[in-house]
Amino acid sequence: MKLAVYGKKITAEAREDIENLHSILIESGVDFKVFHRLNSYIKEHCDLGLEFEEFRTSQELLEYAPDFLITIGGDGTILDAATLVRDSGIPILGINTGRLGFLSNVNRQKIEESLEALFRKDYQLSHRRLLHMESKALDLDLPFALNEITVSRKDTTAMVTVEVSINGEFFNNYWADGLIIATPTGSTGYSLSCNGPIMMPGSETLVLTPIAPHNLTARPFVIPNSCEIELKVHSREEWNLVSLDSRIYSIRNGEPLKIRKADFSIALVETADHTFAKTLRNKLMWGMDKRN
């Protein structure tokens, strides 16, 4: 078995978890490489006494072709990791050293247990659909998003108007701070904070969630992920924003953006005790009412 370990923004609180993870990997005897920024942190702050092979780019990772990519951080780390594995099919196991952790749901107390489950192949893969965006005005090396694509205002506090067409038919003008197009994976992220619904990961759906809409009838709207969406943002300023997960770009007024489901999915590793239902109960405290 070959593994790769990815971490980007390392906090002091995660040091013990990093040492624990790498000690387990060393003892297991598996081959593994470490992302160069994480490797630099290990050399400077961790007392492991070993030099690790490293990778720097998506190309180097794909050439190494690990069986799994282990991320250490939060959900944002998994979103970054998705840009590394791309359409390779390399499954991702997320260790959560962040806060909420819907995607990176292996907590720091279960690192060894989860890795043992991985080694004995006691896991299942959750395949997550991505969004793909086309724009003639933007040169996008990574034109996809795992969580959501969002359009919003830039240099103004005034509302924008988001013109939406679905499958070539005009659908609505949203007067709002912006609009979120979220996947089921992203339904527990930004969309949720804007009153969007939670969708099961395997749902073949998308949700259009307005951000602070001025019209009270503008509610989140669920559509099949087979739909093709076109957005045009109009505002008082020349430039607006579009983000693909955490990657942000500026777009001119009225520039059309075409959004559809991507031609590939990302595989997330789920061990037996880390199902989506259990994650919701743990993170959102469902079922914790004292009346139960």
Image: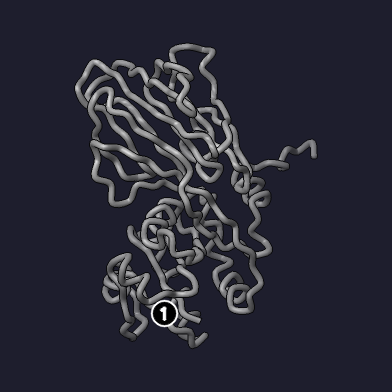
Residue visible at 46% across and 67% down in the picture: 70
Task: Say which quarter of the image contains residue 248.
Answer: top left
Give residue 209's position: percent from left, percent from top.
49, 28
Q: Is residue 37 above or below residue 259?
A: below
Residue visible at 26% across and 27% down in the picture: 240
Residue labelled with disc 1 = 32
Give residue 264's position: percent from left, percent from top.
48, 54
The mark total stands at: 1
User: Which residue of the protein is positioned furthest toward the front in this rendering?
Assistant: 168
Closer to us: 137 or 288: 137
Is residue 223 found left or right of 77 in the rendered image?
Answer: right
Question: Which of the image's four quarters has the C terminus?
Answer: top right
Residue visible at 38% across and 25% down in the picture: 178
User: Which residue of the protein is positioned furthest toward the left in this rendering?
Assistant: 238
* Circle 1 crowding by C-alpha within 10 Å: few under 14, some 14–19, many from 20: many
Closer to us: 83 or 15: 83
Is residue 92 found left or right of 61 in the rendered image?
Answer: right
Is residue 14 found left or right of 39 in the rendered image?
Answer: right
Task: Say which quarter of the image contains residue 39.
Answer: bottom left
Task: Say which quarter of the image contains residue 224.
Answer: top right
Is residue 89 found left or right of 158 in the rendered image?
Answer: right
Q: Is residue 16 above or below residue 50?
A: above
> Which amino acid is tagged 1?
Phe
Residue visible at 37% across and 82% down in the picture: 48
Give residue 89's position: percent from left, percent from top.
48, 64
- Tell me if I can see residue 20 in this picture: no
Closer to us: 64 or 25: 64
Give the SS element for disc 1.
Answer: strand
- Tell me if I can see residue 273 in this picture: yes
Q: How is the image coloured?
A: one colour
